[in-house]
Image (cartoon, grey):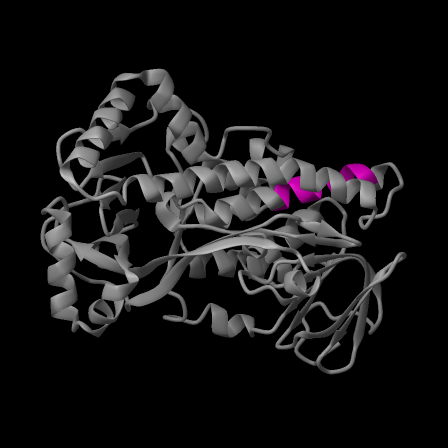
Amino acid sequence: MSDSDTNAKPAGETRDLTILGGGLVGMTLALAAARAGITSHVIDRADPADLVAEGADGRASAISTASWNLFRNIGIAESLAPLGCPIDSIAVTDGMKPGRIDFTPKPGGELLGGSLGRMFANRDLRIALFDAARGEPNIAWHVGTEAVRRDRGPHSVEVELADGHVLRASLLVAAEGRQSPTRDEAGFALAKWDYQHRAMVTALFHDKPHENTAWEIFYPAGPFALLPLLDDAEGRHRSALVWTVAEKDAAGVIAMNDAMFVNEVAGRMHGVLGAISLAAPRMSYPLRFHHAGKVVGQRLAVIGDAAHGMHPIAGQGLNLGLRDVGALVEVLAEGMRLGLEPGDAQLLARYEKWRSLDAFMVMSVTDGLTRLFGVPGRLPSAARRLGMGAVQRLPALKRFFMDEARGMSGKLPALLRG
C-alpha cells in the first residue's frame, strides 16, 4: 500500500469489500460494515486533510431522521450532535404567495425531538467519519491514490493502485460519485437528463432568527431554499442557501459582485429573515438527473451518487445514498451469517431488488416536483396553491409528506430504523 495509508495492511491482503470512494457515502459504508464485522479496503484519491480544511467545502447537508438513526448506530452521532441545527419545520410556498404548507411534527415526537432532520456542514460530517475510520481495524484506508485496474472474476475482485499495489476482496463497491468510472466501465446504462439549471450555494448571515425553519420557495426559474444552521461563535444567525437559476442566466449571476448577489437574494426572501449578508464563499454546480437501471453486476455493487443523482429540491440526495448503505450492510451481514460470501450473486440480487424501487420512487417524486413548480403563469400557480392548501388542511396527507422528508417511509434497513 502507499505510504499515505492509514491503518495500513500488507499488500495484497484480501478483505470482504473494496470500496472505491471515501466520501460521505463510501466512508459511512465502511464504518457501518465494520460495526457488522465486515472488513474493507477504502480507496480515495483525495487527502483527508484537504477535504476537512477550513473553506475547502462550504456546503451543508440535511440529514433525515432515518440517516441520523444510521449515524447513531455506527457510533458517530454523539460527536456530531452539538454541531447540527434541528429542522423543526419546513415552510413550502409558491413564490411567497398565499397558500403555503407548514410541515411541523408534534412536539415530543420521535428521534431528534420530533424534528424533520438536522443540518450539518459537510466538513463536520467528514471529520466525524474520518476520526472514526482511523480507529477502526476493520478498515484499511488508502488515500492519495486511485484504482488503475479493476478485475472482477468469478471468485474474487482485484484492484491495482497507482503505485502498483494490488488489493483483493470478495465484493467491489463503487461509491465514486456521479462520474463513477467503475459504473461506466461495467456498462450500466443511465437514464439521464440535464435540467438546464445551476445551483448557487452559499451561507447567509441574517438579522432575524430562523427558529429552526427551512424555507422552500418555488419560483418558475427554480426553487430557492433556505436551510437553518447553528449560530456562529459570535452569535450571528445563519442559514444555508441553495438558489436554482436557469443555466442561461447562471453566468450573469456568477459574475455578480457580492453586493449585487446579496441584493438579488434579498429580493427573493421577502424579508423573512431580515437584513442579510454573505457568511461563506459562493459556489455553483449544474443540476442533472441520472438513474442507473442496474446497480449490481458480477461482484459489483453501485451506491450513492454513482447509482442515482437528482435535483436538490428536497435535499434527499445524500439521504438516499445512506439508505443504500443500510440496505447493503444488512443484506451482506445476513448472508455472511449463513456462510455466503459478500460477492455472492444471490445477495447482490436482493440488494438491487430492495433499493431499485425505493430509489426510483424518491427520484420520480423529486423530478415531478421540479417540473410541476417550474411551469410559469398565473393559472398553474393558482392550481399549485390550491393543492398546497388542501395538503395543509389534511393531517394524514401532511404526515405522509413529513415521513418522506424524514426518510421514514417504505421498508427501512434496521440501521436506519433506530
The spot of residue 417 in percent (x, y) is 57, 31
Q: Is residue 110 above or below residue 210?
A: above
Q: Residue at x 38, y 34 (%)?
A: 116
Q: Residue at x 21, y 37 (%)?
A: 93
Q: Is residue 279 above or below residue 115?
A: below
Give the extent of the magenta segment: 325-335
In this rendering, does residue 108 appear at all? no
| Quadrant including the C terminus | top right
| Quadrant including the N terminus | bottom right
| Residue 329 is covered by the magenta coloring | yes
| Residue 4 is covered by the magenta coloring | no
In this rendering, does residue 307 appear at all? yes
The spot of residue 395 in percent (x, y) is 33, 17
Left or right: 358 as drawn, with respect to 252: right
Along the line of sight, the residue nearer the viewer: 254 or 251: 251
Along the line of sight, the residue nearer the viewer: 139 or 251: 251
Q: Is residue 9 above or below residue 413?
A: below
Q: Residue at x 44, y 45 (%)?
A: 81
The spot of residue 131 in percent (x, y) is 57, 60
Total label count?
0
Q: Is residue 75 above or below residue 235?
A: above
Q: Residue at x 30, y 16 (%)?
A: 394
Along the line of sight, the residue nearer the viewer: 94 or 111: 94
Main SS, magenta residues: helix
The spot of residue 189 in percent (x, y) is 62, 55
Left or right: 225 as drawn, with respect to 332: left
In terms of image quadrants, where is residue 216? top left
Along the line of sight, the residue nearer the viewer: 267 or 11: 267
